[in-house]
Image: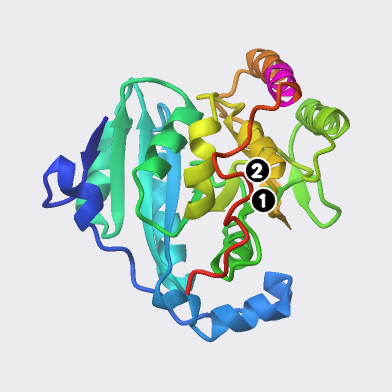
Amino acid sequence: MSKKRRGLRPTDARRRSAPGAPTAARLTAGRLLAPSWARDLASGRPAKTAVVDVVIPVFNEERALSSSVHRLWAYLEAQLPVAWRIVIADNASTDQTWLAAQHLTDTLPHVEAIHLDRKGRGLALKTAWLNSDADVLSYMDVDLSTNLESFLPLLAPLLTGHSDVAIGTRLAPRARVTRQLKREVLSRGYNGLIRTGFGAGFSDAQCGFKAIRASAARKLLPLVEDCSWFFDTELLLLAERNGMRIFEVPVDWVEDLDSRVVIRRTVAEDLLGLWRMRRAFWRGDGVTRDGVGDLLASGLT
């Protein structure tokens, strides 16, 4: 794995990079879904100590990367009331994605990039998160299919200590989704299978818009085996098994028609992953070293 940050040796990239400064909160209770969280963020309390990493996993995204990162950077700079970093995680791209990522680290502050020699979105996320010193770890797909206005509601319950994991959901009543009927049916069927087979309380395992408190991630990531698209489902199932609090945010979401996902292969891998997880839970596996332990700790301040 290699890292790139302007003016730094690769091995020093993570340690020395400075996160973006927090901005004044522009929040209302309605946007954050809970008045207490809105008041906490609006008061600036979490911004005193919290740092958020936003990871963008990419594979052969030379055309979309620059515009998406610039758009995300502008949003974070203007709206986020806590310190932040963008981390581009290039998982073995074969086009000019890595060069584009390096250019972005040279031209935009608070942007880092890591390069992996193996493919896999799960591998990219696991690597970026385990090498992070941020308080909250998040990711979103490079196509920015999810409306960025949902990002603050995603972070709020983590920053204030109300939840351990937060996910965007395209299947909640207030979500607004534009995608092909085939993918809608597959998504609802897959998530229904998870609820039936595991009694899961979350509604959308695969939306590429998630965040997790670093303290929770450090406990769960060593247990996550999948390095590809099943990573999200496995992480959430393990979180529930260990008593973690998962918060859902209904999102506006538009399908990327140029997606790199191969549906048939992904469905097969997901079904095999569910069977593996079911057997593991039957054996009593999937529990963190200290069980629930201190997962219900107070906020970041």
Quadrant in the rendering for residue 131: top left
Residue at which label 1 appears: 244
Residue at which label 2 appears: 239
**Amino acid under label 1?**
Met
User: x, y percentage for residue 70?
Assistant: 38, 54
Residue name at image x 66 percent, y 33 percent: 233
Q: How many marks do you count on the picture?
A: 2
Q: Nearer the viewer, residue 26 or 176?
A: 26
User: x, y percentage for residue 184?
Assistant: 80, 33
Residue name at image x 71 percent, y 43 percent: 240
Answer with left or right where residue 36 lies relative to residue 97.
Answer: right
Q: Main secondary structure of the magenta part?
A: helix
User: Which residue is outermost to the bottom?
Assistant: 43
**Amino acid under label 2?**
Ala
User: x, y percentage for residue 5?
Assistant: 20, 48
Q: Whole-Å distance between the Cαs marked 2 and 1? A: 5 Å
Q: Which residues are magenta?
A: 274-281
Q: Are marks 2 and 1 in contact (CB under 8 Å)?
A: yes
Answer with left or right where residue 250 lies relative to residue 24.
Answer: right
On the question of residue 236 being in view, the answer is: yes
**Mark 2 neighbour density, 10 Å: few (under 14) some (14–19) many (20 or more):** many
